[in-house]
Amino acid sequence: MSKVKSTEYLFLSTYIRARENSLLGAKRLEQMVEAADFDEAARVLTECGFPDLAGASDAQLEEAFQARRTAFLDEFEKLCPEKEIVTAYRVKYDYHNAKVLVKGEGSPRDRERLLSGCGRVAPAVLTAAYAEDSWRDVPAALADAIREARTTLARTGNPQLSDMGLDKAYFGEMLDLTGQLSTGFYTSYVRLTIDIANLRSAVRCIRGHMDEGLLRTAVIDGGNVSPERVCRAYAEGVTEIFHDRALARCAELGQQAIGGAPLAAFEQACDNVLTDFLTAAKQVPFGPEVAVAYLASLEAEITAARMVLLGKRGGAAPDTLRERLRDSYV
């Protein structure tokens, strides 16, 4: 673990607390939900520092979200005492780009549009490495995972299987990176995320009457519940496997979904567990926990804003949008 002291986070924590007021938050989200149309909802985001997105196309929305994420990450990286916190956040986008490249070999134009610039490796660099099969400028674990995913897709023709391999590599890198930090908070968050991913896989596989072998392929190591126990969900039920206090309600809703109930309540509960975990950082006056929670809340803000705006564009009713929203960090 790093020897960085929590007091070295005093400035960054103060900066974050001030910035929290500009996050979308529950109140502004409700204003967006109640807005008469897309344009009115989009203008609420100007209070959070977004440009006026009234009349914006879907592509322009994504550009605005990408610009907000990129600008904050670049600034945050300069201020954060432990760069691994930002690096770990960026890893998600490396693996997103990896999935785009592996599954998009036949449509390079669409592929380019879907790549994110928020990873550790610039899209152009990763694309060139992929095309030339030359990986000197790509982290070894990422390069190995991409090569393996590419081989899996060529052998099986199943993009779901290649995605599973990339997901496993992603979480492996996350655990390695967060294990270098001065706090176990981020690692605990990643382990909980793995548990939720495995619970979701178990529910979907059992609900869809899929072969148990698919779950064994999908299950990710590194969570609080071992892969062996996850796979016993076929015989014992998910409520017996995921009975920890944080996940018990999710497992209960998952068991109901296996029995035929809609998945929406289960999916929402899973996402809310992660938000609840992050709220513990609100009790910390300064330290790396504050930084980790803020990065996660920034991503949740973008996800919520996108969902509401696209829902407004599609004519979704306010109650429908509320049902889709997750708990807010602020």
Image (cartoon, rainbow, N blue to C red):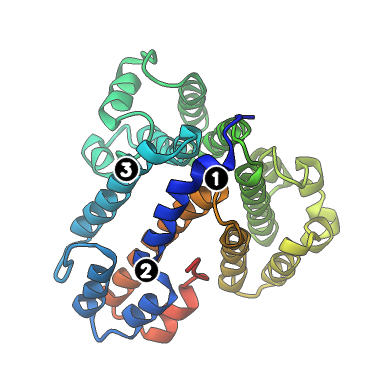
> Mark 2 sits on what residue?
24
Residue 178 versus residue 81: which sits nearer the camera? 81
Q: Which sits earlier in the primary sequence, circle 1 or circle 3?
A: 3
> Mark 1 sits on what residue?
288
Q: Residue at x 66, y 40 (%)?
A: 220
Give the residue type that dot 3 points to.
Glu
Left or right of 136 in this view: 251? right
Q: Residue at x 79, y 54 (%)?
A: 234
Cα distance in 3D space between marks 1 and 2: 22 Å
> Mark 3 sits on what residue?
75
Mark 3 element type: helix
Q: Nearer the viewer, mark 1 or mark 2?
A: 1
Residue 265 sits above or below residue 292 on the image: below
Residue 136 sits above or below residue 1 on the image: above
Give the residue type that dot 2 points to.
Leu
Residue 7, image quadrant: top right
**Percent of width and height locating residue 38:** 23, 76
Q: Residue at x 73, y 67 (%)?
A: 255
Cα distance in 3D space between marks 2 and 3: 19 Å
Q: Are marks 1 and 2 in contact (CB under 8 Å)?
A: no
Q: Which sits earlier in the primary sequence, circle 2 or circle 3?
A: 2
Is disc 2 surrounded by few (<14), some (14 to 19) or many (20+) residues within 10 Å? Answer: many
**Percent of width and height locating residue 227:** 75, 41
Mark 1 element type: helix
Left or right of 289 in this view: 40? left
**Percent of width and height locating residue 243:** 81, 61
